[in-house]
Structures are given as structure tokens and as C-alpha cells.
Image: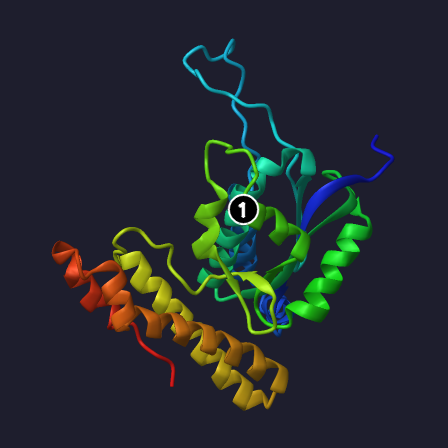
Amino acid sequence: MQKSYSKRLVAYIDILGFKEVIDATVYPSGGDNKRMINYLLLTYKRFKRVFKPEYYTSARKYPYKYFWIKKNTKIVTNFSDSIVISFAMKEISMLPDVLLEIHNMIEILLWRGLVCRGAITIGKILHTPTVVFGPALVDAYLLESKHAKFPRVIIDEPVMKIIKGDKIPYNGHMRLYELENYIAQDIDGRNYLDYFRIHMDEPPILNRSSWRYYDLLYNIITNGLRLSKVTESENLRQKYMWMKEKYNSSAAFYRSKDFFNRYYRDNEDFRSYNMEYKKVKLIK
């Protein structure tokens, strides 16, 4: 059994508004709401699929597998409304993939009407399939609770230095520069995983899935702002006002002349997609 800390990248994610979701799993009469319980179980299963450790079995067992890598050190633990993801720093080439997985997890929550807040840092932790504790987990929790503030997953400066250094070996899946469209810097200087922008192809194409995603964000934010008025909750209002600002900023960019000039001016065959982007709704 492991009896010492190891240096790992650690992400701590907190699902916001989870108490209301848990309340909905029990009827006022005291009976189980099996539909809602199953809904949560399916959400957790989706998490496991996103963070499933990547490995290929031995080439001797499956000769047709001409490529294989050993199982990695990534561990994912979820308990109630909290999720902890970590991997050993000796496997730092996994960083782009893990950041993308966390980004995908944020979208999974959004599709289920949930938002989250979190932090990603580096430090000492003991993380096994059954136990997780250590200074890095405390640091990530404090970053999430005191500095993330809004529905965003912030990236601590030591992690950003690695990203900006761009010296991570290519892992065969994703390069660091490809993360450009997934990370943004907020007005407080904190970097976070940006789930308001669609990953840009050249030129970007707005398909049905993209449309549904923007409609989803629009509805989550407008419903959240409406709820904050009904409950007179200032904290709730601030969270959804932040989301409104980021959403409108992305929508305004897609509708702008700069966006057209950057992606469509020299691509006549794709200009019809630019007209579709202009239909992305702004939140008033």
C-alpha cells in the first residue's frame, strides 16, 4: 500500500446547485424518485467514460494491435457533488488530454442543466482508487472555493507555466497549442477552461449540435437569472451574470465583422455558415 505522497496534477471540481438535485430524488411523500436517481447514475457513468484510463492490451494477446501503451496513472474519484482527477507529473504529456476531458465533463454537466466550479493545480497528494488526501487537494479546494467564485474551472499558475512553455512531449493525441480555443483569461487575471466558445475549425462550421449547445447555454443562463430574481439571491445573480457576460461576448464575436474577415472573407464556399452564426441569440 502506498504510504507517501507523490507529485501530481490535481483537479477539484464542485457541482453547483447539487442539493436541489438531491432533493428532487425524493418525493415529498418520502418515496424514491427513481427517474431522478437513474438520471444521476447515468451522469456519473458519463463521467467514467470521459475519464476512462487509456491503455491498449499487449500486442502478444492481440497481434493486430500494432500500437499500444501502458496503463497510465490517472485516477478519478467522485463523491456526491465533488470530483477529483489526478495523474503523476512523470506523465505530464497527458496534460492536454486531461484538460480536454475536464472541458468535456463541463459540457456533460451543462447538457444535464448543471454548472460547476473548480481548480487545477500541482502538488503533493496521495490518490488511490480508495483514498484521496494531501496538500494539493487542499490547495485545489481553496482555489475553487475562494478564487474560482463563478461557474468556471480555473487553472493555477504552475500549470499555466507548463502550458505556455510548450515543452511537453507530443503524446500522439493532442498538442498544447491546440488548447488555445479551450482556455481564456478572465478580468481578474485567472485562466479558466472556456466552455462558451466552439472549437474552431478552418473555417468554422455551425452544425446542429453547435446550435443545440448555444440554445442550451442561453436557456441555462436566462433561467438562472430568472431564478435569482425570484429567490432574491445575490450570489446566484452574480454567477449567472458572469455566464451572461461570457456568453454574450462569444455570441457577439461570432456575429462580428472581425469574425467574418478572419474565417470567411477568402472562403466563398463557406460564407453561408457565417450567416448562421449571426443568428446566435444575445441575452438582453
Horizontally, residue 248 falls left or right of residue 257, namely right
Q: Quadrant of the N terminus?
A: top right
The answer to whether residue 26 of the structure is visible from this angle is: no
Seen as rendered, the residue at the extreme left is 269
Q: At 51% across and 51% down in the image, what residue appears?
A: 42
Q: Amino acid at mark 1?
A: Lys
Quarter of the image where one finds residue 30:
bottom right
Q: Is residue 180 visible?
A: yes
Q: Measuring 38% from the left and 54% from the top, which residue is drawn there? A: 199
The percent position of residue 226, horizontal first and vertical second, equals 48, 85
Split into 4 quadrants, where in the image is the C terminus? bottom left
Give 89 or 211, whichever is nearer the viewer: 89
Furthest residue toward right: 3
Q: What percent of the width, then of the height, locates residue 64?
A: 41, 13
The spot of residue 273 in percent (x, y) is 20, 61
Q: Which residue is mark 1?
A: 45
Q: Along the line of sight, which residue is nearer the eye, 74 or 91?
A: 91
Foreground: 6 or 76? 6
Q: Secondary structure at mark 1?
A: helix
Seen at 43% across and 15% down, the residue is 66
**Left or right: 235 as drawn, with respect to 241:** right
Residue 111: quarter of image: bottom left
Neighbour tally class for label 1: few under 14, some 14-19, many 20 plus, Cα within 10 Å: few
Residue 109 screen position, x and y as percent: 51, 59
Q: How is the image coloured?
A: rainbow
